[in-house]
Image (spheres, grey):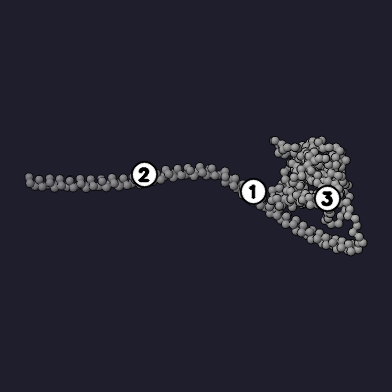
């Protein structure tokens, strides 16, 4: 019996020991499972966050795709415009070089003319009579023209077109120049020629007469500020120089309203007995800007001209100096008929006049 007790006690001890060991192993496995589960949960969370970020990136990519396409198109257009500007720059440099050569030739001609004038002055017996002009005008070169334009009368009105089209003879160059700085627009060859014409006309004004210079585009205004409706004295040289300087400093812009230009006639009291119009074509708008349409065709411009001429007084001669503009074929005939109907003259001067 004692032997059986010993064996039973030993077996019980073995079972107890095994139970203790198994319990410890279960606790360790439970702890290991919890650690692994935590890692799995963390990985699942990261995967979900990754899916969310991926969706956000895809949405952002879809939104930016049109911008990327527009940017590619804009880049291509910028490159194309850059090449065009390079070509224009090369042409401008060539033009500048030719103009410099022309200036040098003109300087040489001027020097020879001055030497000839000094020789003539040295051989002249008297200075001669002063003539009927109040100022002088010296053109380029040694040229005389039969213009048919008589600058006469007691009250002479000069109407000078200062619209954007007076920058150049072609539509493309007008669009290019009107987007340039004002200093560049003032140097446009066509506008420089216009100011020279005004200067030449001012030199032909007879002594004892009165005059007025109005500029116009979509509106009309006097060259001398504050002289609205007033006549200026030809013999006031300082005031005339002020008027001519104002013309040279005017920047051509906007459209052309011949109705508003002719309104200057009715603002003057008494009315002029001679009007000289310097322009390059038919008007582009009436007394006010159109409400809807921003463009006008040739037939529409002709109707605007006829409406403006209908308000012009028949007893005042209208003398027209036309500097033709590209794309306006009806202007010469319409201007000629208007000047003939009022007893005035019409001329299209050569490119080197005056």
Q: Residues within 10 Å of mark 1 (few under 14, many from 20)?
A: few
Is the C-beta separation of discs 2 and 1 under 8 Å? no
Question: Tag 3, which secondary structure?
Answer: loop
Q: Earlier in the sequence, mark 1 or mark 3?
A: 1
Q: Position of residue 30 (x, y in %)?
A: 28, 45
Q: Nearer the viewer, mark 2 or mark 1?
A: 1
Question: Tag 2, which secondary structure?
Answer: helix
Viewed as shown, does residue 174 lie left or right of 270? left
Q: Nearer the viewer, mark 1 or mark 3?
A: 3
Q: Earlier in the sequence, mark 2 or mark 1?
A: 2
Q: Earlier in the sequence, mark 2 or mark 3?
A: 2
Residue 38 at least partly seen: yes
Instruction: Reply above or below: 346 against 104.
Output: above
Question: Tag 1, which secondary structure?
Answer: helix
For the residues marked 1 and 3, what is the alpha-carbon distance in whole angstroms?
Answer: 58 Å
Instruction: Reply above or below: 79 against 304.
Output: below
Q: Which residue is painted at 82% across and 46% down in the image? A: 211
Q: Position of residue 155 (x, y in %)?
A: 84, 44
Which residue in the structure is indicated by mark 3?
235
Q: Which residue is painted at 36% across and 44% down in the image? A: 41
Q: Which residue is painted at 50% across and 42% down in the image? A: 59
Q: Residues within 10 Å of mark 3 (few under 14, many from 20)?
A: some
Which residue in the structure is indicated by mark 2?
41
Which residue in the structure is indicated by mark 1?
77
Viewed as shown, does residue 293 lie left or right of 136? left
């Amino acid at each position: 019996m004692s032997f059986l007790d010993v064996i039973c006690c030993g077996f019980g001890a073995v079972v107890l020991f095994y139970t203790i060991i198994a319990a410890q192993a279960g606790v360790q496995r439970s702890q290991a499972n919890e650690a692994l589960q935590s890692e799995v949960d963390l990985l699942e969370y990261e995967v979900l966050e990754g899916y969310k970020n991926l969706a956000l990136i895809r949405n952002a990519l879809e939104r930016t795709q049109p911008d990327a396409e527009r940017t590619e198109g804009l880049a291509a257009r910028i490159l194309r415009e850059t090449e065009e500007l390079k070509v224009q720059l090369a042409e401008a440099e060539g033009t500048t070089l030719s103009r410099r050569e022309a200036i040098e030739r003109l300087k040489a001609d001027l020097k020879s003319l001055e030497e000839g004038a000094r020789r003539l002055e040295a051989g002249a017996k008297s200075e001669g009579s002063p003539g009927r002009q109040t100022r002088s005008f010296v053109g380029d070169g040694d040229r005389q023209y039969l213009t048919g334009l008589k600058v006469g009368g007691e009250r002479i009105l000069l109407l000078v077109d200062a619209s954007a089209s007076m920058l150049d003879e072609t539509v493309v160059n007008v669009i290019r120049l009107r987007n340039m700085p004002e200093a560049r627009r003032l140097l446009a060859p066509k506008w420089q020629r216009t100011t020279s014409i005004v200067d030449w006309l001012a030199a032909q004004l007879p002594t004892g007469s009165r005059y007025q210079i109005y500029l116009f585009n979509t509106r009309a205004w006097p060259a001398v500020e504050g002289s609205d409706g007033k006549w200026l004295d030809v013999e006031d040289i300082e005031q005339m120089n002020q008027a001519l300087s104002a013309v040279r400093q005017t920047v051509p812009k906007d459209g052309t309203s011949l109705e508003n230009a002719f309104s200057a006639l009715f603002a003057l009291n008494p009315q002029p007995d001679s009007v000289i119009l310097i322009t390059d074509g038919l008007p582009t708008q009436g007394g006010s800007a159109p409400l809807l349409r921003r463009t006008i065709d040739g037939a529409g411009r002709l109707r605007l001209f006829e409406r403006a001429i209908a308000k012009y007084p028949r007893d005042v001669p209208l003398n027209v100096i036309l500097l033709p503009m590209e794309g306006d074929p009806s202007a010469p005939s319409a201007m000629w008929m208007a000047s003939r109907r009022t007893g005035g003259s019409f001329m299209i001067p050569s490119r080197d006049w005056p």
